[in-house]
Amino acid sequence: MQIEEKKHQILQAATEVFGTYGYKKTSMQDIADALDISRPALYQYYKNKEAVFLALVEHTLNLGEQAAIQGFSHSEDSFECLLHGIKNMEQVLFGPIFLKPNGKELLTLSKKLAPDLMTSFEMQLFNKIVCVLDKAVVEQRINLKTLNVEVSDVAKIILQSVDGIKNASESLEELDQQLNLFLTVFWKGLQKQGN
């Protein structure tokens, strides 16, 4: 079996184990047991639990970025791009979290153990949102002049609101519904400014 394929299997198992037991209560033995391998075999790939967790965060953020990119190029319509970019990303990043008892703890921990990865990801997402908003302004689909705000300010509000919605949601379905509602109302408000 190839090294990368084995690492992928380890990360899949780690998602299950961390989500079920939480980071603190999870041991390398728990991850090894989930894979039906020995603990020494697991140590050939990762030196400790934190290394597994950091690799999991990086892998998940990469998947989230790919999903967001696909969503942001979903359509020619700026609103559809924004909606699908954010929702695709949220589905990939947080879908597994809502299915596990300790999932939300993992999100908080990601910010503590992998701040550089999280900041880089958030910056990339911020830049994608700015591009979508810039396009919408140029195409006169939204008007920010009457609000006297910059595109970057609007992008920050969107990201902060999405983060709040994510933290308040109890299920993936609720997250999806709330994101739909927020982005639709927010976008319509920006359109009204042009009239």
Image (spheres, rainbow, N blue to C red):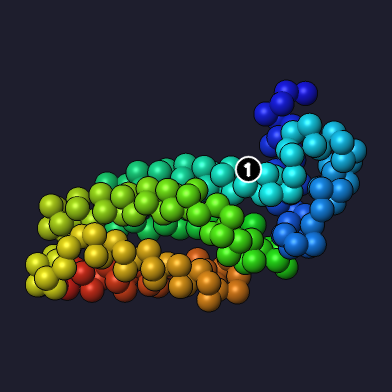
Res 10 → quadrant: top right
Q: Position of residue 130 (x, y in %)?
A: 26, 54
Q: Image point 40% across, 44% down: which residue? A: 69
Hey, which residue is sitting farthest top in the picture?
Answer: 2
Q: Position of residue 9 (x, y in %)?
A: 74, 38
- Identified by mark 1, the residue type is Ala
Res 43 → quadrant: top right
Return the residue at label 1.
55
In the image, taking residue 38 as reference, residue 73 lies left or right, namely left
Q: Image point 58% across, 42% down: which residue? A: 59
Where is 8 relative to 17, above or below? above
| Residue 7 seen anywhere in this rendered image of the structure | yes
**In the picture, which quadrant includes the N terminus?**
top right
- Name the residue nearer the viewer: 171 or 159: 159
Q: Image point 79% across, 57% down: which residue? A: 26
Mark 1 falls on what kind of element?
helix
- Name the residue nearer the viewer: 72 or 46: 46
- Name the residue nearer the viewer: 21 or 97: 21
**In the picture, which quadrant includes the C terminus?**
bottom left
| Residue 94 seen anywhere in this rendered image of the structure | no
Mark 1 surroundings within 10 Å by alpha-carbon count, few (fewer than 14), some (14 through 19), many (20 or more): some
Where is 58 relative to 78, above or below? above
Where is 46 relative to 56, above or below? above
In the image, taking residue 114 as reference, residue 68 lies left or right, namely left
Res 78 → quadrant: bottom left
Q: Position of residue 96 (x, y in %)?
A: 64, 57
In the image, taking residue 169 as reference, residue 138 lies left or right, namely left
Q: Image point 23% across, 74% down: which residue? A: 189
